[in-house]
């Protein structure tokens, strides 16, 4: 059985709240790519305005591990966003 989860977090954007910086999306995607095949079955990283949105698919019994991957990915994105200020 699988769990499908959607996460969204504002990480700062271009021209106010219109888009997320491409390098932030790429960094989040890279963390998920490393976890694909072990913790994650599949994922999509996109944005809505300045929010990074991640849809992940994981085993139902590994949701805590999947959440840890998400936390790590978003922490990487936050570090990049902070470096812009």
Image (cartoon, grey):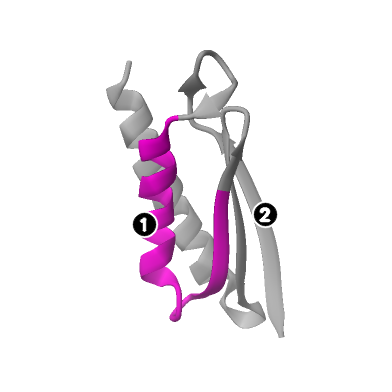
Horizontal and vertical percent position of residue 44: 57, 58
Look at the image and say whether residue 76 sits in the magenta stretch. no
Question: Would you say 6 lies left or right of 85 here?
Answer: right
Please tell me which residue is depicted at 45% across the width and 80% down the height of the picture: 37
Quadrant containing the N terminus in the rendered view: bottom right
| Image mark for residue 30 | 1
The stretch of residues the image draws in magenta is: 21-45
Q: Relative to residue 57, is residue 76 drawn left or right?
A: left
State whether residue 25 is above or below residue 1: above
The Cα–Cα distance between marks 1 and 2, rounded to whole angstroms, is 17 Å
Query: Would you call the spot at circle 1 few (<14 residues within 10 Å), some (14-19), or many (20 or more)?
Result: some
Provide residue 66's location: percent of width, then percent of height.
52, 67
Up/down of 32 relative to 24, above or below? below
* Residue 17 occupies quadrant: top right
Tag 2: Cα neighbours inside 10 Å, few (<14), some, or many (≥20)?
A: few
For mark 2, what is the residue?
6
Residue 64 x/y as whole percent:
55, 68
């Amino acid at each position: 059985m699988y769990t499908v989860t959607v996460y969204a977090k504002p990480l700062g954007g271009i021209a106010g709240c219109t888009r997320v910086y491409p390098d932030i999306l790429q960094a989040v995607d890279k963390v998920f790519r490393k976890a694909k095949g072990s913790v994650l079955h599949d994922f999509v990283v996109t944005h809505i305005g300045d929010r990074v949105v991640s849809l992940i698919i994981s085993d139902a019994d590994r949701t805590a591990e999947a959440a840890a991957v998400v936390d790590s990915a978003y922490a990487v994105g936050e570090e990049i966003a902070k470096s812009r200020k």
